[in-house]
Image (cartoon, rainbow, N blue to C red):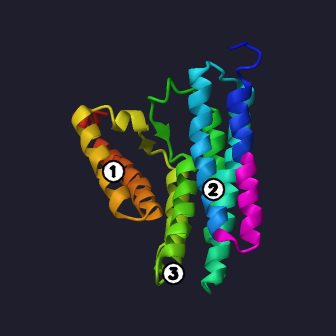
């Protein structure tokens, strides 16, 4: 591919991700939370694809890095917060504490992105991330809303969503090392077990439920691994990470 044009593919994917985020916000304000949540998840997938395509095409650039951060702030920081806020309002949860709970997500996301942009670039996605990526945090919140929309008694809005917003914000501003998917799947036996479990859950549970469980299992695993590492410096090596 012509060197002048290979940058168009990852940047084009990033702009599509931005469009998804903007549409998610607009649809959420109209009460169409199902469509809005799905668009946030679409933006999450596109966020993975633009980075992968940039590495594949050797089309990484400073412009792409800054663009990606700006888009993440809209599509995976602001949009999930708006979706969560309106879902809480629809569920009759409108206490004064809802506002700071929702605001923590984009504020922590902005901090996380600014810190990320000051760090050395990763090498083919093999390195850990310092703090939970905003993409994972935003996807987790959107998946919580989507799961609740399909759950009979909507218990997640009342008992899960607000604590989840705070947890995602805390993990984003933390210095916990969140391993890449490559690192988690590096050990062959673990890779086989995780793939089999993933297939089983996606075949036996609604997709949003399974995805929400796996996303938060990754977060929990990373936090547990960080705790083990603080007590035993070689814990990561014994786990094959």
In the image, which residues are magenta? Answer: 18-33
Q: Secondary structure at mark 1?
A: helix
Residue at the spot x=38%, y=56% of the render? 202
Residue 114 in the image: x percent, y percent? 66, 41
Q: Is residue 27 magenta?
A: yes
Mark in front: 3 vs 1: 1
Please identify the dominant SS of the magenta region.
helix
Question: Is residue 237 found left or right of 134 in the rendered image?
Answer: left
- Label 2 and label 1: CA atoms lie apart by 23 Å
Earlier-in-chain disc, 3 versus 2: 2
Earlier-in-chain disc, 3 versus 1: 3
Look at mark 2 in the image and give the residue it sits on: 40
Q: Secondary structure at mark 3?
A: helix
Look at mark 3 in the image and give the residue it sits on: 158
Mark in front: 2 vs 1: 1
Look at mark 1 in the image and give the residue it sits on: 199
Residue 203 in the image: x percent, y percent? 35, 58
Residue 49, quarter of picture: top right
């Amino acid at each position: 591919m012509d060197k002048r044009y290979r940058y168009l593919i990852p940047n084009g994917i990033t702009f599509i991700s931005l469009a998804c985020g903007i549409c998610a916000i607009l649809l959420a304000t109209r009460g169409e939370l199902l469509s809005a949540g799905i668009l946030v998840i679409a933006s999450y997938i596109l966020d993975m694809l633009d980075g992968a395509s940039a590495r594949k095409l050797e089309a990484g650039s400073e412009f792409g890095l800054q663009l990606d951060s700006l888009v993440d702030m809209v599509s995976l920081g602001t949009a999930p917060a708006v979706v969560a806020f309106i879902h809480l309002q629809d569920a009759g949860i409108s206490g004064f504490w809802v506002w700071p709970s929702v605001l923590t997500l984009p504020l922590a996301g902005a901090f996380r992105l600014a810190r990320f942009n000051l760090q050395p670039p990763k090498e083919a996605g093999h390195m850990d991330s310092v703090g939970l990526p905003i993409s994972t945090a935003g996807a987790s919140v959107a998946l919580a809303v989507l799961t609740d929309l399909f759950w009979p008694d909507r218990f997640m809005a009342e008992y899960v969503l607000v604590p989840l917003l705070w947890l995602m914000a805390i993990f984003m501003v933390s210095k916990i090392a969140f391993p890449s998917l490559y690192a988690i799947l590096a050990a062959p036996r673990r890779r086989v077990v995780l793939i089999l479990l993933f297939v089983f859950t996606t075949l036996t549970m609604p997709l949003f439920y399974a995805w929400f469980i796996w996303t938060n299992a990754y977060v929990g695993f990373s936090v547990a691994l960080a705790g083990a590492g603080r007590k035993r410096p070689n814990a990561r090596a014994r786990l094959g990470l």
